[in-house]
Amino acid sequence: MNHAPLTHLGDMPIETFLKEYWHKKPCVIRNALPDFEPLLSADELAGLACEEEVESRLLIGEQQGHSWQLKHGPFDDDAFGSLPEKGWTLLVQAVDHWLPEAADFLDKFRFVPSWRMDDLMISYAVDEGGVGAHYDNYDVFLVQAEGTRRWEYGGLFDSHSELKPDLPVKIIADWAPEEVVELNAGDILYLPPRVGHNGTAVGDDCITYSVGFRAPSMQEILRDYTDYLGERMLPEQRYADANLALQANSGEISAAAIAQLKAQLIASIEKEENLAQWFGKAMTEPKYAEIDPAPEEEMDAETLVEMLQEGAVLRRTEGCRFAWTAVGDGGVTLFADGASFPCPPAAVSFVQELCHQRELEGAKLVALLNDPAAQAMLQILYNQGSLYLENLDG
């Protein structure tokens, strides 16, 4: 079942939220998800943390006799049986990669472009459990799923902010929050980047969902984009000074030389088509590149279309990322899991709908696949593992 993006957060229209709060200031939204139902139980979350491919952590807060402790999964039953009664948290990263219902839940937040979305982290904490006062460099929605969590938040922090020394996690020193709230099931705390926050479970069975977003640093952007451009340049593209003037001192790097270098650099990087192609690939890179989602058996386009005509549902593979950008000939470039695919105009409608919806089915999907170009894209994406079929008996 498809999950349309939210039109409101509680009583607040999404347009109001984006205009007044997104990337600007924190916001507490009571009963933001009035019909919310938890995606999985605490025991099921612990079961995920025992899986080899799943990224998970156990954080035990300061206890009598020891400081903070951090343990990385996968875990076994003994790890959970030996925990103290209070003050610990289990965190499981990218639950949307492993649980289709979690991927559907993320679709509620597609009022932000889907290529900005990173993952859904779910944490379970017993009384007094938390991860300490910290900040993130990205926007985050903190959704209370079960139980109660007290949030302290406020103040802007960065890499120059003082942290407590000699700890396995980054905890802000001299934490002094500006606001304190308690969140119950269905409530949301939204925080823009760099706002300090500290969540503590009030009672047992506290489950919190963290919807995080991709925000590459300018360091990453400059390094990766210049590498991308450099790989596409010819050896004879070099610094040039055809208008060289005689200098009084031959050892001087003149203002004219710097201006010439600047002009050549700008000419190299300002082509928007290059930037769009790099950006699409970068923002759809899989979170876990070592995981190969390809099916055991490849299928041709004709077989896939026949199965869809018979009622199969086409679904994006959990953890796979899609985006598209228009190109000048009326076609688009599709980006899927860090790869790019030029698509002619005949395949545009299929590609755009595929990027917009997690699931496609029925007569509308069959109509989108009338053209061989669209069928070719279907075959490529299925055989590389970015798409799969389900509900063959439905």
Image: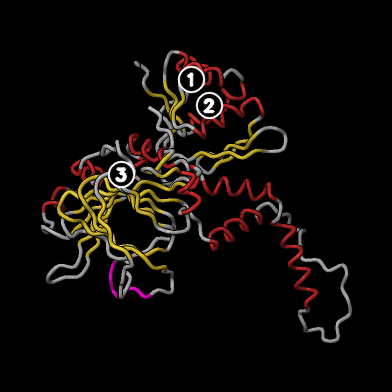
Whether residue 281 sits left or right of residue 307 in the image: it is right
Determine the residue positioned at 58% across, 37% down. 334
* Horizontal and vertical percent position of residue 164: 30, 74
Amino acid beneath label 2: Leu
Q: Quadrant of residue 202?
A: bottom left
Give the residue number, with chain letter if any, for mark 3. 31
| Earlier residue among tags 1 and 3 | 3
Badge count: 3
Determine the residue positioned at 61% across, 57% down. 227
Give the residue number, with chain letter if any, for mark 2. 378
Give the residue number, with chain letter if any, for mark 1. 304
In magenta, the rendered stretch is: 162-168
Asked if the stretch drawn in magenta spans residue 181, the answer is: no
Outermost front residue? 11
Secondary structure at numbered mark 3: loop
Q: Please say if 346 is above or below 123.
A: above
| Earlier residue among tags 2 and 1 | 1
